[in-house]
Amino acid sequence: MDLSIVLVNWNSKELLAQCLRSLEASGTRCEYEIIISDNASTDGSQGWLRALERANPRVHCVFNADNPGFGVGNNRALPYCQGRYVLFLNVDTVVLEPLDALVDAADRLGERCGALGGRVLNADKSVQLTCREAYTLPVVIAGLTLAFAGIRPWFVRRQQLADWDHATARDVAMVSGCYMLVPRRVLDEVGGFDPQLFLFYEDTDLCYRIRRAGYVVRYVPVSTIIHLEGGSSRRAGLSERALSSSMLSARYFVGKYMGRGHATILTVTVWSGWLAMWGVFAVMSVLCPLPGPRALARRRARLLKRALAIVLQRDRV
């Protein structure tokens, strides 16, 4: 078996079905299997998956009794993977080209191969920024504060490789977990996703551990897919759960790789930024003369207030 394709599903039956259809139509020739880890979906996914598993010998499903998050959902599929390589693939993706070129790129790297990310496009066919240079504390802080206001400073663009055309192969610090190929032997050595990370930074953490073990993490512009980015959570919009999870995961990640002192600086800076933004949005929700912006400010103020409460409650526990 060349490839074990792992997908984590949570209430995304239609997106998953679209992804599987695109994979079947992609012309992929290498021998592959599909492992689907379902995180206690309630949208009819589980009945549909049981029927799919019976009808398709390539497919094996893992039915979780809870929703442990993206990383643990992937981890629970790993014991069933028989391929030389494991491809972590989001359900909200469309496979446009055969996956053979991605497998071939990994074979060419040989023993040095740690993780590969293929070419990812947005729905409008523009390049999606799915690989990064190493994270710094200012980049993490900006992602939790300035990004909320739609601001992306130069040092964030540089870390995101935003001004690079993504037309050539390049060694990077991390590739996105939406489309990440890892040799099974490497996963056996470094482990799967960190279970402490429920949402966000799981892929970065795994790539950091792979690089620390001496392997190469590389972007290769082959085997193109489209990533719709967000799936069911995107349809629901930005939530206090996602915002608070991003803060908690960022703090854990910074503490793990940059030290507890940097994690403290992150906490104080982000809390201060959130409180300041909450104050601005609260005032705008009352004084703004235009109903549209006033309603948006009200929603943003409510979102920040609830996210702050979740983080505070988690800290007390």
Image (tube, rainbow, N blue to C red):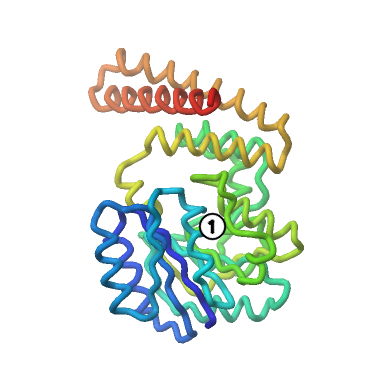
**Residue 49 horizontal side relative to residue 210, left or right:** left
Spot the residue most to the front.
65
Q: Nearer the viewer, residue 233 or 36?
A: 36
Residue for badge 1 = 176
Spot the residue most to the bottom.
29
Q: Quadrant of residue 84?
A: bottom right
Q: Nearer the viewer, residue 203 or 102?
A: 203
Instruction: Please indicate, yes or no, whether residue 228 appears anywhere in the rendered image.
Output: no
Of the residues shown, which amino acid type is indicated by label 1? Ser
Residue at 37% over, 67% down: 94
**Residue 234 horizontal side relative to residue 156, left or right:** left
Q: Nearer the viewer, residue 313 or 19?
A: 313
**Residue 224 position (above or below residue 269):** below
**Residue 235 position (above or below residue 76):** above
Residue 68: x %, y % from top left: 45, 48
Residue at 63% over, 30% down: 266
- Binning the other alpha carbons within 10 Å of mark 1 as few (below 14), some (14 to 19) or many (20 upward) gives many
**Residue 164 position (above or below residue 264):** below
**Residue 284 horizontal side relative to residue 105, left or right:** left
Q: Quadrant of residue 34?
A: bottom left
Residue 9: x %, y % from top left: 37, 58
Dot 1 falls on a residue whose secondary structure is: loop
Residue 62: x %, y % from top left: 41, 63
**Residue 179 horizontal side relative to residue 300, left or right:** right
Q: Nearer the viewer, residue 27 or 202?
A: 202
Residue 3: x %, y % from top left: 52, 77
Residue at 33% over, 41% down: 237
Residue at 45% over, 35% down: 243
Instruction: Please indicate, yes or no, whether residue 186 appears anywhere in the rendered image.
Output: yes
Number of callouts: 1
